Image (cartoon, grey):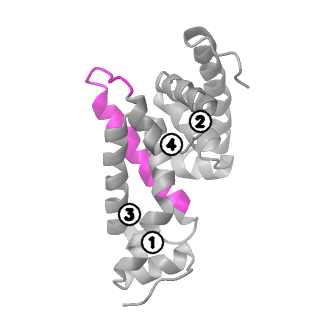
Amino acid sequence: MHVVTNHTDFELVDLALRGDEKAFELLVKNHKNRVATTAMNMLADPEEANEIGQQVFIQLYRSLKKFRKEANLSTYITRITINLCLNHLKRRQNFSSRSLELNQANKIRSSENQADFESKELITKALQKLDEKHRSIIVLRMVQGFDTLETASILNLPKGTVLSRLKRGMEKLKIILETEFNYKHYE
């Protein structure tokens, strides 16, 4: 076994494909926070987000041979995360929506500032009121920080669709925050 040190994601993928378990463990370690944040913002349920997170890395492991290194590994992993979340949300539509367990959600997010946490809490609640097509765009662009082209690639959408859904989604999010949560500090 090769000892994993400071390797790029692409190098770690190559090592993992050759059977280096430590390389794959390091890939998981390097990307687990992004997966957790994306899943939590899409699902707003810590248990479901954790389950999706596990599925993401299982799917990543199974599909490493298919990864062509045409995009960053973080983009590839985020695409897997969003797709699994969207599939989960479709299955969930038949069930009543669950209440947020904000104390557990706090463990996933890394905010130590209470005012910051309260703002994030309200935004997470408001995101759950958006339809999936707008929520996924906002999570990718505004929460995860992907640019428009990366977001378009992850969701397999044209750039113009991403831009229009982002604009419309942000408008809807602002209305939800102001009307349902009386939150006026939104920009």
Q: Quadrant of residue 176?
A: top right
Q: Nearer the viewer, residue 100 or 177?
A: 100
Q: Which residue is mark 3?
A: 60
The residue wearing badge 4 is: 109
Disc 3, SS: helix
Q: Amino acid at mark 2?
A: Ile
* Camera-nearest residue between 36 and 102: 102
* Residue that label 1 marks: 26
Nearest to the eye among marks 4 and 2: give it: 4
**Crowding at label 4, few (<14), some or many (≥20) Cα neighbours within 10 Å?**
some
Camera-near label (1 vs 4) is 4
In this rendering, the label closer to the viewer, 2 or 1:
1
Secondary structure at badge 4 equals loop
Q: Is residue 97 left or right of residue 5?
A: left
Q: Sequence-wise, which precedes: disc 1 or disc 4?
A: 1
Residue 21, given in percent of the width and then of the height, sits at: 34, 78
* Label ID, residue 138: 2
Q: Quadrant of the N terminus?
A: bottom left
Give the magenta part as a residue range.
74-100
Q: CA distance from mark 2 to mark 1?
A: 28 Å
Regarding residue 79, the answer to whether it shows in the image is: yes
User: What residue is rendered at 43% in x and 83% in y?
Assistant: 15
- Name which residue type carries label 1: Leu
Disc nearest the viewer among 4 and 3: 4
Magenta segment, prevailing SS (helix, strand or loop): helix
Residue 44 seen from this side = no
CA gap between label 2 and label 3 equals 24 Å
Upstream in sequence: badge 2 or badge 3? 3
- CA separation in Å, label 4 and label 2: 17 Å
Q: Quadrant of residue 25?
A: bottom left
Q: Is residue 107 above or below residue 3?
A: above
